[in-house]
Amino acid sequence: MSEIASFSDLAPAERPTLLARILAILAGDDDRDVVVVLMDAGNEIDDEIAAWLLMNHFRWNHVVFFIQVPGADGLTPPVARELTVPQCAVRQLKSHSRVQRMRKVFPEQFGDSDIWSPSVPEGFQPPSTFILGTHWDFLQMVNYGCTSWGGRPLAKADQNFEVKWWLQIAPLFGITSFELENFKIESRIVMGDLEHPEKSINCIKAIPRDASGGELRAGYYNQEKTLNKNSTHTKFIPTEVARNVPTPMCFVERLPESMKEPILETAFRQFVGRPDPKFPWAEDICDINHRYIMMMLPPEKMYQILSEPTDQRLIKEVIEFLKPEIERREAVGDAHIGDFYPLRLGQIATAVEFITGVQYKPMPKCASGCATQFQLNDNVDSLVDSDLARKNWMTYISENNCDLTPCYDGMAVLYMMYSAKRSGLVPWAEGVPSIEWCKNMLRYLPYRE
């Protein structure tokens, strides 16, 4: 495989055929199980954790595709529906940015190549092969790619692309149900509530609730119809269950430095920053942020913040943060913001300032209408001294072994490990792991160099 470098070095039209050739080489004898992971690396920290779990605990007899999808970021928010670039191009660019995120987090595996295989002990052959790509490349390969030395097409009317494990840990916006027709899936695991899809970002929660989201909602239900038809087994992980399995700091500290640093940077930004309230899911995410950040505090400090009024300085910032969305909702007749949303924002900000020892600063209004208060990203820094804040935050969470955000997407891999363990590596086992089992796996899983 040494002659194959990065798909990113090739013209887009050349990538699917190369992917098809690679799969024909790797899985031509059908001895290896194919795992497809639909993910949105960089959105939080759990996609990268899911990838790490797979690369460390499924090290032989698998071909694993880490397929980057645009995710919820591929949607346009309610106040910015007019795009200067076609939506499909925006989604492709987002998928490519997620590929770059994987390269940054896993430089030894994907720094200069899209294909990686680990070293495995003698007798554990063949080693697994892990392939990184975008949803466009992968779907083109499945539906149109073929081998070039007399091999058969990988997918046609009477032939399916067989997948042993399908891990769906990101929303599939930008993928049509027709592009999923050629898959034959044995075991499908979805991070999201398929019975109540409005509760999960990976389902329809991120879709605008008004008429503008109708096409996307219809697309989701068509996808589900196709995937249900093509899947022998399906399990899903309700968001309420996954929220009970945090990412422990002791787990993060066992990760290699190349992975730990970008994950902690993302975790810090999520700790400091709140989602712009214009997104349909922002208020719900704030509830989860509130729960986990309050749990980081000493009991007496948590009680103080929850029982005493928020400082007027922070209340003013909360009002400025919410004002554009309140005005937008009033103008179009949308539901009002929840009564506890402003309260929780103020309490979170108080806790952030306590843990970091750094205050939020008053922020100017943004011409685009995007929130600038309680933000920390490449474009906006709402802290007085974010470098000091990060240093103090890191010290605090390490000394107190704080839990970070829920390990949503890592749960899908834990479900996969549980099914394989219970069934003796037969593809499926009934039942789901307990919350305590998942927590213990994250606390005590061994790390392989």
Image: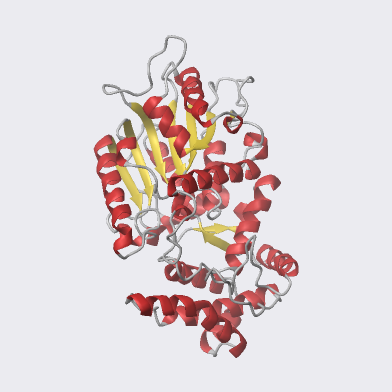
Q: Where is residue 85 in the image (x, y as percent from the top left)?
A: 49, 50
Q: In the image, what residue occupies the spot 37% across and 31% down?
A: 163
Residue 387 visible, this angle: yes
Q: Position of residue 395 (x, y in %)?
A: 72, 65
Residue furthest front in the image: 84
Q: Does residue 237 appear to the left or right of 100 in the view shown?
A: left
Question: For this rendering, which residue is in front, 303 or 186?
Answer: 186
Q: In the image, what residue occupies the spot 62% across and 77% down?
A: 364
Image quadrant where residue 248 sits: bottom right
Q: Does residue 13 appear to the left or right of 101 in the view shown?
A: left
Q: In the image, what residue occupies the spot 57% across and 46% down?
A: 97
Vertical placement of residue 147 versus 16, above or below: above
Vertical placement of residue 264 versus 63, above or below: below
Image quadrant where residue 399 sits: bottom right
Q: In the image, what residue occupies the spot 63% across and 45% down?
A: 105
Question: For this rendering, which residue is in front, 63 or 416?
Answer: 63
- Colouring used for the render: secondary structure
Residue furthest top in the image: 150
Q: Quadrant of the N terminus?
A: top right
Q: Does residue 398 appear to the left or right of 246 in the view shown?
A: right
Residue 194 visible, this angle: no
Q: In which quarter of the image is the C terminus?
A: top right
Q: Position of residue 343 (x, y in %)?
A: 48, 82
Vertical placement of residue 23 versus 189, above or below: above
Q: Position of residue 9 (x, y in %)?
A: 61, 30
